[in-house]
Image: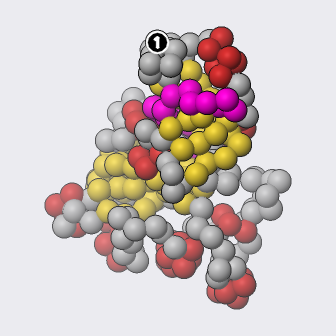
Amino acid sequence: MLRKTESIRGYKIRARDGDIGKVVDFYFDDERWIIRYMVAATGGWLDGRKVLISPAAFYEKPDWRDKEFPVILTKEDIKKSPPVDTEKPVSRQKELELAEYYKWPAYWHFFPEDITMPPLPVSRRLYHQQEEEANHLRSTREIEGYRIEAKDGKIGSLWRILLEDESWEIRYLAADTGNMFSGKKILIAVDWISEINWALERGKVDLGSEYVKNSPEYDPAR
């Protein structure tokens, strides 16, 4: 089922021995367009510290009715986990520390053509071989509002992000066309995205604006 990331913010993350906190953001892999971590605000029990929780920590399916994510961790696990400054880019080295601590799979060792392949063991040797590798984690909050351009001009701004709740893959970006097409909202499949310029906060799609104008309107209520 497709869900908006915006609608999942505020969901509780439930550890074995109590609530950890609430989801405030997601980090996704900008090469694979898949959610890698939830960002949880822990509140008063951990002095408001924000922590990263991988979907690999789920031991049951999310409780969509009660808006909870049950994870196999304990609050003590979270308390002793390596600190992460979520106000700065998360380095691969920091991800490695988290993966080693929690025994999470090192997703960057997947073969590109097969996301379901079992991960290779975490290895510092492999990490050092990739030490200069660019970081590909992005915040979903960061890209909301980015300008979206067609081949022949602007078509609107990124309004919502829709993910598949089984695989955690991002399927569509919802764009608000604003004054361009009377505020029409449309869905853009991530496969259509030809480029994203993170510095200029804009993305380009491999479509003409006429295609956008004639495309079905996205109704978030349906």
What's the amino acid at mark 1?
A: Ser
> In front: 192, or 74?
192
Q: Splitting the image into 4 quarters, where does residue 198 fall?
A: bottom right
Q: Position of residue 152 (x, y in %)?
A: 67, 29
Residue in front for this viewpoint, 206 or 116: 206
On screen, residue 34 above or below 86: above
132 relative to 13 in the view: left or right = right
Q: Is residue 212 magenta?
A: no
Which sits in the foreground, 1 or 6?
Answer: 6
Label 1: few (<14), some (14–19) or many (≥20) C-alpha neighbours in 10 Å? few
Residue extent of the magenta highlight: 150-168
Residue 158 among those drawn in magenta? yes
- The residue drawn where x is 70% and y is 76% is 121
Please identify the residue farthest to the right as the structure is shown: 113
Colour scheme employed for the rendering of this structure? secondary structure
Looking at the figure, which quarter contains the N terminus? top right
Could you say whether the residue bearing mark 1 is in a helix, strand or loop?
loop
Q: Which residue is mark 1?
A: 182
Does residue 182 appear in this view?
yes
Quick check: can you spot residue 140?
no
Task: Write the residue at 73% across / 34% down.
Answer: 206
Q: Residue furthest front?
A: 152
